[in-house]
Amino acid sequence: MTGSSQAPVDTATVAAIRSGRTPKPHKQRRGPHALSNNKRRLIATISTVMLVIIWEIYGRSVNPVLFTYPTAIAGAFVDMVKDGTLIAATGHTLSVMAIGAVIGSVVGIILGLWAGRSETFAAVIEIPLNALYAVPAVALIPVIVIWFGYGDIAKIVVVFFFTIFPVLINTMRGVQEVDPDLLEVSRSFCSSESRLWRDLLLPSALPYIITGLRLAIGRALIGIIVAEFFTAITGLGNLIVTNANTFQTARMFVPIVLLSVIGVVLTSLLGLLEARMAPWRRAA
């Protein structure tokens, strides 16, 4: 094919790369029925409040041994904070989870960037990655316990396996999805590999990386609680099991609701990070 048949390259993108600025992906047009951010938040808030009200009304009509309601959970929360059990358990669970999640995320990002840039490495890890990802992480816990015992090391390894895959896969996809035209323009201006990463590959992959991290947060919270059930029962997992065994339903729900709140807060913080570091995604 002749050179005239090649797809045209955006002149603004060429100018951005030539001047050393990071090229921004084109903003996608919002659909005619798309909600504004403020309206979306308002709807989410109203629906959440309505759900809590329905829960409160229904929960009061059910045997408290079988179910509970928000105000009872709030009272149990205050009691557990006062006696120190909730703070100690939360600190232990979150510290162990953070170690496993950070290690899993860092390793996932590094391997994802490498696999996204190197087709050879992507081919090397393809079958092991698909095989491990297809196996439920819970099924690996007995093996992890045999290898690492019942302590915190085993819990960290469990969280690592729950966390690494969404980060790795999304990071790899982010690098692979970079527009080939942009890569071609960068090469035509003799950009070094380090500059290519700094100005094009990392900014383009960043939204995918953050998406992987947001998915990893939920999996990390699941992983640490499941790990606490299967290993030495400590932290928030211990509170859930202990209060369930003694039929203290309101106290049992406190760590469950707390984990939900933590997940929402962490996911929202990552959303703010994405809006700050990749502002062009707001219009997507």
Image: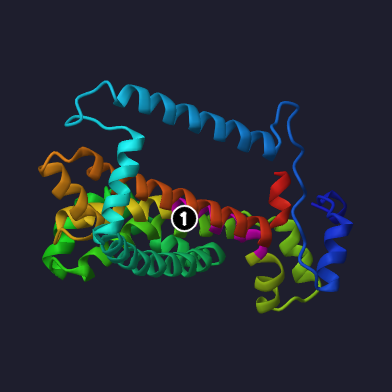
* Quadrant position of residue 250: top left
Expressed as whole percent of the image width and height from the top left, the position of residue 217 reads 42, 54
Expressed as whole percent of the image width and height from the top left, the position of residue 55 reads 37, 27
* Quadrant position of residue 245: top left
Q: Is residue 208 left or right of residue 192?
A: left
Residue at screen point 46% across, 55% down? 169
Dot 1, crowdedness within 10 Å: few (<14), some or many (≥20)?
Answer: many
Residue at screen point 20% across, 30% down? 64
Label 1 residue SS: helix
Q: Is residue 18 left or right of residue 210?
A: right
* Residue 140 visible in the picture: no
Q: Is residue 283 above or below residue 64?
A: below
The segment highlighted magenta reads 203-216
Expressed as whole percent of the image width and height from the top left, the position of residue 21 reads 80, 69
Q: Is residue 140 above or below residue 147?
A: above
Total of numbered circles in the picture? 1
Q: Which residue is mark 1?
A: 169
Give the camera-side residue of 1 and 233: 233
Q: How is the image coloured?
A: rainbow
215 falls in the magenta region: yes
271 falls in the magenta region: no
Secondary structure character of the magenta stretch overall = helix
Give the camera-side residue of 203 and 262: 262
Q: Is residue 38 left or right of residue 59?
A: right
Residue type, mark 1 in image: Ile
Expressed as whole percent of the image width and height from the top left, the position of residue 209 reads 54, 59
